Amino acid sequence: MKKLMAFCCFTLSVNVFAQVLPADQQIKEAIMALPEADRQNAKIWGYNADGEMVVLQKGGSGYICLADDPNKKGFSVSCYHQDLEPFMSRGRELQRENKSFKEVFDIREAEAKKGKLKMPKNPSTLHILSGESVEKANYRYVVYIPWATAASTGLPLKEVVPGAPWIMDSGTHRAHIMISPPAKK
């Protein structure tokens, strides 16, 4: 019985470590979320062999990209403008503390209102490529415009036709324009 248990534990450990892709592959996939012209010299966050988030590439282009999380189902990479880093970083920190979506939202909202959380002064874009696999991934664009409303932008509060822009979280620190092109077939 002990031999079987030891074998099971060893197999489990190998599988956990096998999920993390080599750094060069994580970088290659992470920058897929950016337009080709912007892929040079982006800062890349990815995962080490222990599954911890680490900087894989320092960068300096003004873009920050996140590699696919090996612990989550499907495929998702994203890249965003450096002015969003305080907002994104704070969100990751609160998620590590196991805060719910609502708690993360409420904490960042309060911190942004107090000026403790620095939000972008100009519209700042997040590029997302996600789906059940790399091959079946689709783009989504998010343009953060803190405190904007449907009235201040002229955008509807929901998508009117497939792929049309609309504003989400209107009037909050997290106000953003959603643009979701129709999925590839």
Image: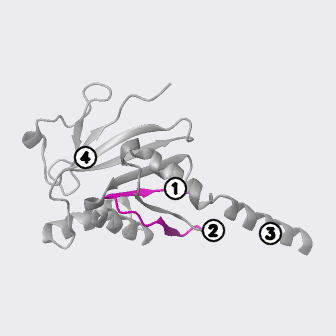
Mark in front: 2 vs 1: 1
The residue singled out by tag 1 in the image is 27
**Does the residue at mark 4 contact the one at mark 3 (Cβ under 8 Å)?**
no
Magenta stretch encompasses residue 63: yes
Q: Amino acid at mark 1?
A: Ile
Q: Earlier in the sequence, mark 4 or mark 1?
A: 1
- Measure the alpha-carbon separation of dots 2 and 3: 15 Å
Residue at x 14% of width, y 51% of height: 171
Q: Earlier in the sequence, mark 3 or mark 1?
A: 3
Q: Which residues are magenta?
A: 50-71
Compared with 40, 166 (above or below) is above
Residue 143: x and y in percent read 25, 46
Can residue 1 be seen in the rendering of this structure? no
In the displayed structure image, the side of residue 3 where residue 121 appears, left or right: left
Q: Amino acid at mark 2?
A: Ala
Secondary structure at badge 1 equals: helix
Q: Earlier in the sequence, mark 4 or mark 3?
A: 3
The residue singled out by tag 4 in the image is 143
- Measure the alpha-carbon separation of dots 4 and 1: 23 Å
Q: Amino acid at mark 4?
A: Val
Secondary structure at badge 2 equals: loop
Residue at x 91% of width, y 72% of height: 3
Compared with 95, 162 (above or below) is above
